[in-house]
Amino acid sequence: MEEPRIIEFPKICDRRGNLSFIEGSGADFEGHVPFDIKRVYWIYDVPGGQSRGAHAHRTLQQLIVAVSGSFTVTLDDGQEKKEFFLNHPWMGLYVPPGMWRNIEDFSSGAVCMVLASKHYDESDYIRNYRQFLKFSNERRKNKIS
Ligand code: T46
């Protein structure tokens, strides 16, 4: 099973400010993201104290970037939880399928940009934690056997 990990993007700095970019893979070029990018969305104007997420995806892969401000992403694979504090626009968190995620502690003005491997599909979501635990146990058994 793929593990979550931080990916760093190029950062080009000069006296006018900084520029970072993310490129998808091409025929002779390995991009910055380990999947083909099918969708981009972003979350912003999150009121203080609110959280997002509280679900998992069956197959979707994502890359989460704090393009402005900061927030904390907690990933739970059904056995272990890991926290990632994102506060740099030149790095992203790769989230493999089968991870329950919570995003919280949004700073004022935070923008959470997400690159996704598939178009929006509600049937890919698991929004019930018990169902998620069942799903992740079965997934683990199938990987082991
Ligand atoms: C995730 C975290 C990080 C769409 O119509 N199209 C879209 O591409 C998305 C992402 C959402 N929606 C609709 C579905 C809901 O009616 O927007 C509404 C809010 O979505 P949701 O409650 O799932 O938002 P978050 O912030 O809890 O979760 C989102 C993503 O849905 C999810 O994949 O990993 O951001």
Image: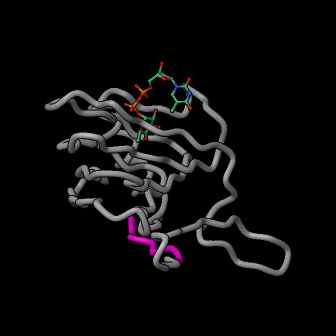
Is 73 or 22 nearer to us in this picture? 22
On screen, 134 above or below 45? below
- Horizontal and vertical percent position of residue 144: 43, 66
Q: Which residues are magenta?
A: 3-10
Q: Is residue 77 magenta?
A: no
The reply to whether residue 74 is visible in this rendering is no
- Horizontal and vertical percent position of residue 123: 56, 27
Is 101 or 52 nearer to us in this picture? 52
* 84 relative position to 2: left or right: left
Is 111 or 92 nearer to us in this picture? 111
Image point 45% across, 72% down: which residue? 7
In the picture, residue 17 is in which quadrant? bottom left
Image point 69% across, 58% down: which residue? 36
* 80 relative position to 52: left or right: left
Image point 14% across, 31% down: which residue? 49
On screen, 14 above or below 143? below
Of all residues shown, which one is farthest toward the right?
Answer: 27
In the picture, residue 105 is in which quadrant? top left
